[in-house]
Amino acid sequence: MLHRLSSAIVLLVVVISHDAQAYRGDQIYASPGERIDIGHRKLNLYCTGKGTPTIVLESGLGGRASAWARVQPVLSKTAKVCSYDRAGYAFSDPGPRPRPAERLVADLHAALVRGKVQGPYILVGATFGAFVVRLFAARHPGDVGGMVLLNPSPEEEELTTASATVERIDREGLQHAKACRDAAARGKLEQNGAKAKDCLPGVNPEFSPQLNAARIAMLRKSATWSALVSEWEAIRESAAEVTAASAKTFGFPLVVISAGREGELQGTPVDKADLHDAWRHWTAWQDDIARISTDSLHMRTKDDSRAAETTDPALVIAAIQKVIAAARNHKTLAP
């Protein structure tokens, strides 16, 4: 739960990078790519590069394509890569509610089929997005050639009772998202008042002016916050769906990348103890997720970030390329 809150804030507000060059070409995410009709509504899809298998990028909470601005352009030099805005985010139309993983999988599958994006797919899922790609693989096993999971959300984290500290932090995060949704619906985020400052990010000097304007415009919309709230409120249902579909172990190459260091603990001694206990459980669950395939590697970063796609893109790219090579050559992953 706590890690869900961290990743949601990272994806909606965006982590500041120290490498300005990394965002060259991010203007593609500032305007629609190909809007695919999936039946009475459209999802926005960006496919770049050529080659097989196709890499499909699935964001965490706040699910929009621009989260992959440091990954997709590099991978596109040697492979076909597709990212997309989930329903309600950026340039995609809102979808029916609630928004559990099963519904998100149906959306993604429809977009790929109707967008004529051929498999096999290397599915890449960040945090909450891991629920989506794992369930996608369970529902469409013949379409999947490999998987990379970045700080994947564990089912147990959602389905077991957390400490009072973690529950409080999670509840406060959801309440904040609801407050921003309601403020956006009332037009309060169109003004430069206190609520806008609370819900909207500042200008990121490492983003192009086009992407800065687009992401702020997106966060002024109630549809953005409604999508986040709906996915957040249905997250236990998503975890239960993944659990029910996880009886069979996969045989494709899988790389799991997890934070290698515990974050700085804040709050009272009780809070710190609860958060440390949550960290211990989370790291053990990461090991469990790495065992969902018979051909897997588990890599850990050198920091505490839960957004490796923005803070350690080189590691993410290397992991994806390792899975691509294994899938193309029909070999197991080299340690």
Image: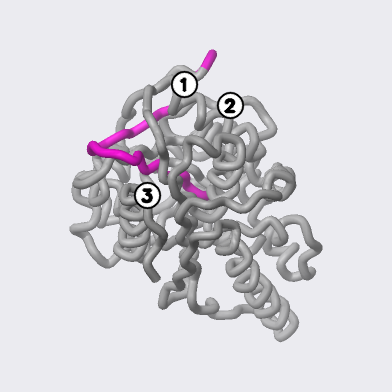
The CA span between labels 3 and 2 is 33 Å
Q: Is residue 56 magenta?
A: yes
Compared with 278, 149 (above or below) is above
Front-lying residue, 18 or 110: 110
Residue placed at 46% from the left, 21% from the top? Answer: 42
* Pointer 2 with pointer 1, Cβ within 8 A: no
Counting residues from the start of the chain, the first of labels 3 and 2 encountered is: 2
Crowding at mark 2 (Cα within 10 Å: few <14, some 14-19, many 20+): many
Residue located beneath label 1 in the image: 42
The CA span between labels 1 and 3 is 31 Å
Front-lying residue, 9 or 185: 9
Residue located beneath label 2 in the image: 95
> What kind of element bears circle 3?
helix
Q: Nearer the viewer, mark 1 or mark 3?
A: 3
Residue located beneath label 3 in the image: 327
Residue placed at 23% from the left, 51% from the top? Answer: 74
The residues colored magenta run 39-60
Counting residues from the start of the chain, the first of labels 1 and 3 encountered is: 1
Query: The disc labelled 2 sits on which kind of residue?
Result: Gly
Q: Is residue 304 left or right of residue 205?
A: right
The CA span between labels 2 and 1 is 9 Å
> What kind of element bears circle 2?
loop
> What kind of element bears circle 1?
strand
Front-lying residue, 98 or 188: 98
The C terminus appears in which quarter of the rendering? bottom left
In terms of image quadrants, where is residue 289?
bottom right
Counting residues from the start of the chain, the first of labels 2 and 1 encountered is: 1
Residue placed at 63% from the left, 66% from the top? Answer: 288
Compared with 79, 45 (above or below) is above
Q: Is residue 331 left or right of residue 290?
A: left
| Residue 228, x across and y down, in percent | 58, 42
Query: The disc labelled 3 sits on which kind of residue?
Result: Ala
